[in-house]
Image (cartoon, rainbow, N blue to C red):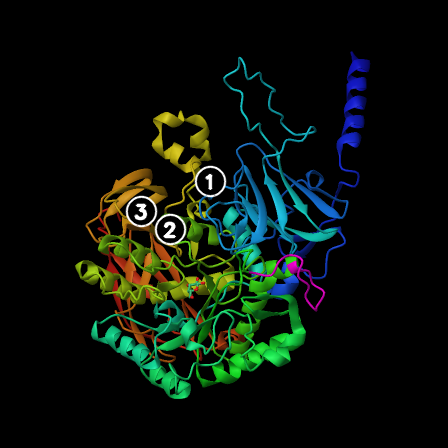
Amino acid sequence: MKTVLKRIAYVSALMSILTAPASAQSLLWKEVAPGVWKAEAGIPEKQSLLTASGARPAIEALGKMKPLPFPLNEKEITAGVVDGETYIKFPLIRNEQIFGFGLNFKSVHQRGKILTLHVDHYGGTDNGRTHAPVPFYVSDRGYGVFINSARYIRVWAGTAVNKERQDPSAVRDRNTDKRWTSAPYSDAVEILVPAAGCEIYVFSGPTALDAVRRFNLFCGGGPLPPRWGLGFTQRVPTLYTAEKVIEEAKEFREHNFPLDFIGLEPGWQSKAYPCSFEWDRTRYPDPVGFVNTMNEMGIRLNLWTNPYVSPESPVYGRILPHTATHTVWGGVVPDFSIKDACDIFTGQLKQSQVSIGVAGYKLDEIDGYDKWLWPDVAKFPSGNSAEQMRQTYGLLLQRITAEMFRESDRRTWGLTRASNGGGVSFPYVIYNDYYSHEDFITALINSGFSGVLWTPEVRSSKTGEEWLRRFQTVVFSPMAMINAWASGTKPWSFPEVENEIRYYALLRIQLMPYFYSEFAKYHFEGTPPFRGMALEPGFRSGTQQEVKNTNLNDNPYAEAITREIKDQYMAGEYLLVAPLFTGQTSRSVVLPEGNWYDFYTGKYAGNGEVITVAPESGRIPVFVKDGGIIPMMPPALHAPAAGQKFDLEIRYYGKKPGKYMLYDDDGISFDYEKGNYSWREITVVPGRDGKPAGTLSKAVRGKPDNIGKVEWKYMSTFRDW
Ligand code: GAL
């Protein structure tokens, strides 16, 4: 018997040598920041996602997280270079779920996917081609993996089955065995990087949310928007004139609709597609006067542009030597990995727009489609390949434009159609032309796994109902925007829902102290402000046991949490948003463990269960976690200006003692980087009379203090105290 076993062991050892890729080996892991490990496979290329983004780890913030050992078995991670390409293998165990790989629109669970991560305009299939195909995934076992390569990375996310594998599933006969499956169990994420090396990073947890936080902090932490960036924004039709824009801004005031910034579409430029980066003097004869008038009305300007340089642009001659071999719509393509190209480009933007008070940009057409952009055979003067440029163009353009505003000590809040891993801290929100409301919500969920921000923008609608449903979700997103570039739709275009629309537009402003604090947590702690349920404590972790022991068919909650939840999400620490889509009057909502309360009424809604809600018409279902504290300000038409005090209405929900950290700073400059900010603690505890009692800690001496009067609103009933 012994010799037989020995022989089997010998044969299987020999088999594994013969079947493993020639150079597959375990990696040498080095802890490069608290809870973050790096290994090199082959020889990493100079141009990577991290070099393009220039991301710098927030070491101090990472240091505040719990130290943990390497989260996986090192021996189970292998990599090797074969034929100039890097093969990487990470283990998976049964029932493990993974999330991420960038801005997907249709799916949240990524186990079982085959993807080619390729920057592109999203084309309707989750195949890896998207606006931010971030090569980062996070596991519900509480670790994350990032591949730092600016290549078209291929991923088999738990689909391929190795001959040598852990926990193999039985081989079955399809003819006779009903349990036969076309997708036998795979125990690995396998990754092919088409380059002879790359860096690999592993992030520890302990939870999936912690792994995401470490990834975000490693990339510098999230951006802190100016307060006005969290206000409301309207984008006007392409050929609007200065007069029309001013008129529209006045209409907002007359209709009592908030407005913090207006976006001008291609027609502000004298030539567009390709671009001149100059004002069109027929439509905007006096740019300085125009920008001043808008600013005096409390409204900032955001300008659309793509980066392709028209022969009629004043910078064409100077930038030409620093451009690619191929053109886009007849415009030359600057190589933004060359400093001179960046300086010439941003020099024009600064001189013509930023210096006169323009507040931000919308960076368009830097994602795809293939037939529009440069082909992969194009050459760039820096020597970076067309592929690397495609994967990093969004990062590079965000980086240099963000830098312009930083130089003038003004925060910006803009839009981009492309980003990638490493772009966490850029003050840009991704958008696209795809316009599926349901899929826009799934994208919002996925943005939170990948260190990017996404807006489910509203453009046009067939009915007032659709208008309202879309509008409600944009209010609970990183940018509350109507993009009316083609439709000219205004918030009040559907009179039958005008009041509801106004209510939500003003609610957006009221929630500003909450959302601003949530963005500060993204910046300082790495916590994504908008994220999927899988990152919510109490959603999965506390319930796995139950899932195992229950007949799923008898327990809708157990079944629900193993399902992909892609139509409800968390907005900040305490709010759970469950959008309704056109045609729906009710929906089911999966409430994680713990008590949840209705946002509008404070009424108890449920605990660790699937509920069906049929809200009062005109409302989007929103729930608050037990102990939830939501600091709100009075409705207003604009975000508070720097130094302007605002009153607080602090809402409290549930019956658990609550705590909330309220962030404050000047709201516009980079002074917070010099420590000029404050966190104030809000607490609610049972008072002596059995009623809740709230306290707000004192303003911090010598730090910005914008809080005026405070009013407490205890939303729930407190019989249970
Ligand atoms: C599209 C963009 C739209 C709008 C339009 C203007 O590429 O996605 O949001 O800006 O260009 O031409």
Query: Where, by quadrant of the figure, is residue 338 drawn?
Result: bottom right
Please identify the dominant SS of the magenta region. loop
Residue pointed to by mark 3? 596
Q: Alpha carbon of mark 2 to alpha carbon of mark 1: how far?
A: 31 Å
Q: Residues within 10 Å of mark 3 (few under 14, many from 20)?
A: many
Examine the structure image and report whether residue 398 is included in the region drawn in magenta. no
Identify the secondary structure beneath mark 2.
Answer: loop
Tag of residue 479: none
Residue 536 is left or right of residue 639, and the answer is right
Examine the structure image and report whether residue 376 is included in the region drawn in magenta. yes
Span colored in magenta: 373-386
- The vertical placement of 300 against 167, above or below, is below
Q: Alpha carbon of mark 1 to alpha carbon of mark 3: how far?
A: 18 Å
Q: Position of residue 16 (x, y in %)?
A: 76, 30
Q: Position of residue 203 (x, y in %)?
A: 60, 50
- The vertical placement of 265 against 351, above or below, is above
Q: Position of residue 50 (x, y in %)?
A: 63, 61
